[in-house]
């Protein structure tokens, strides 16, 4: 059934030379063999274009191609390019009876095109069913899916599962609303705070395609500014797509768009909407009834008609990285769409990632920033408390917070809510020696010891054993301190210190969207900070060394991003807003926070990575799996000549009962990881080589017992 000609059967190599010459002469004179499509059980064949080229829903790489099927006459009208179909797959040549291929299991697929004849020489099986006459896959979406699959060394079928939501029959039967006429061009509004902001909005309204990296000013105006950019694009008669990290950000932009445009002009695509509502919204976009889309990660593939703008907010958020194969990042997908559709591009955040700085450095995008006067007028006052300050502070020795932090909290509570950012959730996740700060480890497995909420004993976070008689192996001390105190423990301590003030927590168990302007202590983990009406009066950023000390290339960038996100919710300095960061003030990310200069921090980081050859200047891939499998894969793959292999090195063993990250080894298994690096311009060659090797390996694995190997392009954590 393959659209590619299969090799002839064995035995030709052993034939005498006279027979080989005769065979070659016969083949040379013969006409090119063409398929004779036979329908299932002898049903009549479609009279025109009786061959359907189908993409089957098989995510394995060695089957990442199209397959040809015969079109029965009864399905001729519905079997059009772009519809969902069901076909029989898996029947070999030995399953042919009376010239018809039979057998195989029913699987889903997409009809790509109709042809007059096939280049496959054997009999073709027939289409089993047209699931729906709705044409949901067009050439533009298929081209994008193919580009993403090639970019990330994945299969088209896997990317299509991310791009096209599951079918819902009830939503499909309902008609979509009639499209509304383009709105009037909007006023620039708060875009005038930026040096080129008004010109950017005017360019969108005029139908041009500007590309910008937007360093947003602190405060809640970013949602309205995004909405005005979308409205300007709609005014030019084009469509717009905005991708945001979570549902709370989507709700804010949704409200801003509704306020500007009214109901019915944009669609919201999130997983929280439910399968029927989400598919109905997706169909409205596909049919052209709605020209603007706001959504989370899955919306990056939304089939917007006449796309004029793609926008992404906070590209450093982990939520933009898809956990399912081939694990594309929303930023890279939107960059592909901007190049494919030649549309405008807007990458905005309070922070500036190194990837965003590279877009400006290469000239692909222009910076969209505010003057320093505007930054100082919108930002709060940032103060720091380092190790030397803590050593001189008597209050910090006895309690967790230094004197400056207590004073800022006390003064802030007189005028409104105070935000407290804690790096970890829970009670006391990690303990350390009070004298030398050596982490407390289990004597049995060397796992981290954790304090319990309702018990005096410590417990290992890996093996679960309790430790009742711990002493420090470095200094011999017996006193412990919390290495990183969780959100619940912090809320408990602050509640005792300020008994008349309500304490609210926001984290994984319960994420608050907003809080009132009444005095309150709001303890939150990074990314879960609620928005306060009128802004917070103050914010405490605790345990900064815990985020900066992570063994990751992006630790400093990520810490600065989380700090800026929390500090942007605080009132300006002119209104009394103050931020206190418990971190060493000499460190580069802390200095960038004090000066409110994320762009400068990103530019310096980009320069250092260029010298060392690290992403995003270079392209990198991670190969992960059992040690023998990784070594065998690296020997088999034909890497580009400029490729450099780093490793392999062992990965941390996943403990039993602990959550397993995507691509991490199964609990108890010892895996290794190797990094493959290529210079700029060779990323496509690297992805192609890895995809070819992985396809060959999976083809052998389907007939053998080879262990699986994970391949990921542009891994987010490279150590």
Image (tube, helix red, strand yellow):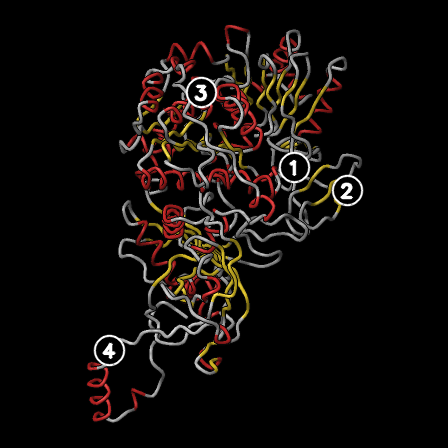
Q: CA distance from mark 4 to mark 1?
A: 75 Å
Question: Tag 4 or tag 3, which sits nearer the N-term?
Answer: 4
**Disc 3 designates what residue?**
225
**Disc 1 designates what residue?**
430
Q: Which mark is residue 31?
A: 4
Q: CA distance from mark 4 to mark 2?
A: 85 Å
> Residue 239: where, in percent of width, then height?
40, 32
| Residue at x 48%, y 17% (from the top left corner) | 221
Label 1: element kind: strand
Q: Nearer the viewer, mark 1 or mark 3?
A: 3
Q: Nearer the viewer, mark 3 or mark 4?
A: 4
**Disc 2 designates what residue?**
468
Question: Tag 1 or tag 4, which sits nearer the N-term?
Answer: 4
| Relative horizontal placement of residue 489, taking residue 175 as reference (left or right) | right
Classify the position of the N terminus by image quarter: bottom left
| Relative horizontal placement of residue 257, taking residue 275 as reference (left or right) | left
């Amino acid at each position: 059934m393959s659209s590619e000609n299969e090799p002839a059967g064995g035995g030709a190599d052993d034939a005498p030379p006279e027979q080989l010459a005769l065979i070659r002469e016969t083949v040379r004179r013969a006409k090119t063999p063409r398929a004779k499509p036979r329908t299932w059980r002898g049903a009549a064949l479609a009279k025109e274009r009786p061959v359907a080229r189908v993409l089957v829903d098989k995510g394995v790489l060695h089957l990442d191609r199209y397959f040809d099927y015969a079109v029965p006459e009864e399905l001729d009208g519905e079997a059009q390019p772009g519809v969902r179909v069901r076909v029989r797959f898996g029947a070999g040549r030995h399953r042919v009876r009376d010239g018809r291929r039979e057998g195989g299991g029913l699987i889903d697929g997409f009809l790509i095109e109709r042809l007059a004849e096939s280049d496959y020489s054997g009999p073709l099986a027939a289409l089993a069913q047209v699931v729906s006459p709705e044409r949901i896959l067009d050439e533009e979406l298929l081209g994008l899916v193919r580009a993403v699959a090639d970019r990330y060394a994945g299969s088209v079928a896997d990317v299509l599962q991310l791009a096209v939501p599951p079918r819902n029959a009830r939503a499909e039967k309902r008609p979509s609303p009639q499209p509304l006429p383009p709105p009037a061009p909007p006023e620039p509004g708060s875009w005038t705070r930026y040096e080129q902001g008004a010109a950017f909005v005017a360019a969108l309204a005029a139908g041009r395609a500007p590309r910008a990296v937007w360093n947003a000013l602190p405060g809640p105006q970013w949602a309205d500014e995004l909405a005005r950019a979308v409205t300007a694009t709609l005014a030019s008669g084009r469509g717009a797509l905005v991708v945001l990290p979570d549902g709370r950000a989507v709700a804010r932009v949704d409200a801003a768009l509704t306020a500007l445009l009214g109901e019915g002009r944009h669609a919201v695509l999130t997983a929280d909407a439910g399968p029927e509502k989400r598919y109905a919204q997706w169909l409205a976009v596909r049919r052209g009834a709605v020209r603007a889309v706001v959504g989370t990660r899955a919306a990056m593939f939304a089939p917007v008609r006449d796309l004029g703008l793609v926008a992404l907010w906070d590209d450093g958020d982990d939520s933009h990285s898809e956990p399912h194969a081939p694990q594309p990042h929303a930023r890279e997908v939107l960059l592909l769409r901007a190049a494919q559709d030649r549309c405008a591009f807007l990458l905005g955040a309070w922070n500036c990632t190194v990837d965003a700085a590279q877009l400006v450095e290469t000239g692909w995008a222009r910076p969209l920033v505010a003057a320093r006067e505007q930054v100082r007028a919108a930002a709060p006052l940032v103060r720091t408390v380092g190790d030397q300050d803590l050593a001189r502070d008597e209050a910090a020795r006895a309690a967790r917070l230094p004197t400056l932090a207590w004073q800022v909290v006390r003064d802030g509570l007189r005028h409104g809510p105070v935000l407290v950012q804690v790096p970890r959730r829970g009670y006391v996740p990690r303990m350390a020696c009070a004298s030398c700060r050596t982490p407390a480890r289990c004597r049995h497995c060397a796992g981290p010891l954790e304090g319990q909420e309702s018990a005096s004993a410590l417990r290992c976070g890996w093996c679960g054993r309790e430790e009742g008689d711990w002493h420090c192996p470095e200094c011999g001390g017996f006193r412990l301190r919390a290495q990183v105190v969780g959100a619940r423990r912090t809320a408990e301590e602050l509640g005792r210190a300020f008994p008349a003030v309500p304490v609210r927590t926001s984290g994984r168990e319960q994420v608050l969207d907003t809080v009132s302007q009444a005095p309150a202590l709001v303890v939150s983990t990074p990314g879960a900070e609620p928005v306060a009406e009128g802004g917070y009066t103050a914010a405490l950023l605790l345990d900064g060394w815990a985020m900066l000390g992570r063994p990751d290339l992006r630790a400093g960038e990520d810490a600065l991003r989380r700090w800026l996100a929390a500090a942007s919710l605080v009132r300006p300095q002119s209104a009394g807003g103050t931020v206190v960061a418990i971190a060493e003030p000499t460190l580069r990310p802390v200095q960038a926070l004090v000066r409110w200069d994320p762009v400068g921090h990103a530019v310096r980081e980009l320069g250092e990575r260029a010298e060392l050859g690290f992403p995003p200047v270079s392209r990198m891939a991670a190969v992960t799996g059992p040690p023998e499998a990784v070594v065998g894969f690296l020997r088999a793959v034909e890497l580009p000549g400029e490729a450099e292999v780093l490793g392999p090195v062992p990965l941390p063993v996943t403990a039993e009962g602990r959550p397993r990250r995507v691509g991490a080894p199964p609990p108890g298994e010892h895996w290794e990881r190797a990094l493959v690096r290529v210079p700029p311009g060779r990323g496509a060659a690297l992805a192609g080589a890895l995809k070819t090797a992985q396809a060959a390996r999976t083809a052998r694995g389907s007939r053998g017992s080879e262990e699986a190997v994970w391949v990921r392009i542009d891994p987010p954590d490279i150590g």
